[in-house]
Amino acid sequence: MKKDINIHDIARKAGVSVATVSRALNNNGPVSEKTRQRIKQIAQEHDYKPSFIAKGFARQRSETIGVILPALVDEFFTEVLHGIDEEASRANCYTLVSSSHVQRDIVETLSDFMAGGRVDGVVLMAPHLHGNITSHLKKGKRPLVLLNSGEKISQIPSFNFDNYQGAFAVTQHLIKHGYTKIATICGPEGNHDAEERLRGFKDAMQQSDLTVNPNYFVRGGFTMKSGYYGFMRLVTQADRPEAIFAANDMMAVGIYEAAKSMNMVIPADIAVAGFDDIFLSSLLSPRLTTVHVPIRELAKKAVQYLFKMIDGKLETDSSHREEISTGLIIGGSCGCANVTNQAFL
Amino acid sequence: MKKDINIHDIARKAGVSVATVSRALNNNGPVSEKTRQRIKQIAQEHDYKPSFIAKGFARQRSETIGVILPALVDEFFTEVLHGIDEEASRANCYTLVSSSHVQRDIVETLSDFMAGGRVDGVVLMAPHLHGNITSHLKKGKRPLVLLNSGEKISQIPSFNFDNYQGAFAVTQHLIKHGYTKIATICGPEGNHDAEERLRGFKDAMQQSDLTVNPNYFVRGGFTMKSGYYGFMRLVTQADRPEAIFAANDMMAVGIYEAAKSMNMVIPADIAVAGFDDIFLSSLLSPRLTTVHVPIRELAKKAVQYLFKMIDGKLETDSSHREEISTGLIIGGSCGCANVTNQAFL
DNA sequence: ACAAATTATGTAAACGTTTACATAAAAATA
DNA sequence: TATTTTTATGTAAACGTTTACATAATTTGT
């Protein structure tokens, strides 16, 4: 790899000092229009690109933000990443991504990111953080924002969906249909989203004076498979529920599959509602009634906030926590009729 | 942001020179076991992390690879990214990702990545590269590999699926069912994958002495929508085709939707096959017959090759081109019976 | 015990920018 | 014109590592 042309070369060719070149190219300090033009001309001709790494070194800035995701598998994370990258690119920043693999866990990645200016700030997506991680988080010397984090961690701003409200609304909708025997397949224990959705469900039930039958409560793992088996457990009871609220759409998909294999018809035999509004749910037949979460918006807000922190434009009270509101999507799975299923056209 | 502790601080505390600290911490040159231990101890105590950016500056290495994707939207790209990140992390590298947005086009991003050591190498995913880009590509001073690129660009190694073979095989399968009136909804013009799949389709038809009726040829855009309308065009003809080969699964999904709205049954009324084996296709009913593409494997091979280039472990003949073979997935959509649909359990 | 070989450590240059400060040139003011 | 103000440019330090080379300490071989 032959050596790149550097700022000294340009300076020499233009007969000026490196300082002037730097100023001219960055439109920074004062430079006479004439020399500025000449320098830009020469830089262009020689296809000079300042070394990012030297620049970063000098300015102690990498113009990069780090993103740590629990995994890169599903649509949800893809959307998050896209939202982040979009917003970052708007700020002329790049996105360093790491999905946490086995060998490189969250804490390590985080301190790697934080240390030594690899990134200027970090977006950490962590649906379940156990206590010992949180202490680590605060040690970081660079700005950090949390996405979908569990507990309110003081000092670290976090951005979440209003899971509670969403679950409450969709449950309420099921109740309005007149169902009284409503079951839920909730998410994994310790997962913040799961807990909040469950809370919303329970409160909506209680508000309508409906009891949550313990037999109508199944814990799932946010996977299709767990939805499938959860459904099986629920409907093989003597007293079947009339409706099921699945804490996410993937589990609802599992429910659809299971219903099919049991020759049960949704919503005639049993109503279903989900949460997340993943693309797939719009293709189910009947379309799944679910809760829309504006992922892109979440990501954007988080990144915008992060940039403000990086630029020091923020009071560092920073116990900021934002809950982005969700929206109810009515499909046919809850029993509503006349719902068109072809939003994609 | 208070200043990080640096190597000089550690050196002072340990009463040795910075060189020794560097050697001790990187297990590089010779250091006596005693001092190495002491230095590591001290570094640990003070939570010292070498500055990545200074290190990169000194070594002219960023331990980062760049990935440029056309968009971050669908499952396919997610898988690619995951594969890349996984392999990169195995080599203790991070992944800088950029999906090409409007404001920051491929060429610019690429030269940004290349210039000034922001990354050590680049994986460029470019299903359609027009001529004037290719000249830019060669100017880059850092290793580059192409994914799913079109033309054979000399000097730049590229990794592709064997689209031709896959399309040939799946078409052949349709033919074996006895269909003679086979239509195709192909991909967008200029897209390399699309062209190759079309070629495979045509050759398979020809080999069985079947003609491709021009009315049975529709151009789609790899989107669900285009599959939907493509289907409509095909089946509203007087002489309907008996089977359709969609050049990707998303379009096949559109076909399913369209068939449903026409009250046509797959495969009884018309058989369908796709290409890509996306997750969604496994959930269709009947399961879509399609071509599996080992995305992770593609990504891994590309990255491994890239690292070899970075490490200079490679003869720079570099007209390397690899075609990764695909696999036929038999669902019920082609007419095959007794196909189970619940691989996910 | 002395030379030679090996091992451990230190010194200082290099990496390519930015930027505070100093200085020189030009423009504005008196 | 002499003085002040503004604008343009240059000088050199700083950023925190790595590493070639020099030197010092230790071990090995005789």
Image: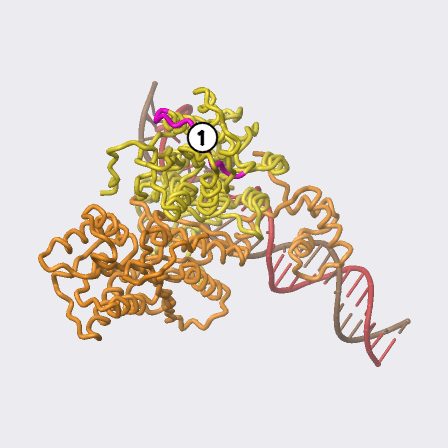
Chain colours: A orange, B yellow, C red, D brown
User: Which of B19/A342 is in front?
Assistant: A342
Give neighbour class at mark 1: few <14, some 14-19, many 20+ (Cα, 10 Å).
many
Q: Looking at the image, which residue is at 42% across and 35% down?
A: B244
The kind of residue tagged 1 is Asn
Q: State the residue lying farthest toward the front.
A: B238
Q: Position of residue A112 (x, y in %)?
A: 38, 51
On the image, which quarter does residue B162 sit in? top left
- In this view of the protein, can residue B257 be seen by the observer? yes
Q: Is residue D12 left or right of residue A207?
A: right
Which residues are the magenta region?
B176-188
Q: Position of residue B274 (x, y in %)?
A: 40, 36
Q: Position of residue B178 (x, y in %)?
A: 36, 25
Total numbered labels: 1
Q: Looking at the image, which residue is at 15% across and 55% down?
A: A235
Q: Chain of mark 1?
A: B
Which structural element holds mark 1? Answer: helix
- In this view of the protein, can residue B66 be seen by the observer? no
User: Which of A11/B105 is in front?
Assistant: B105
In magenta segment, residue B177: yes
Q: Is residue B303 left or right of residue A255?
A: right
Q: Looking at the image, which residue is at 34% across and 44% down?
A: B280
Identify the residue position indicated by label 1 in the image. B163
In magenta segment, residue B268: no
Q: Classify A209 as above or below A77.
A: below
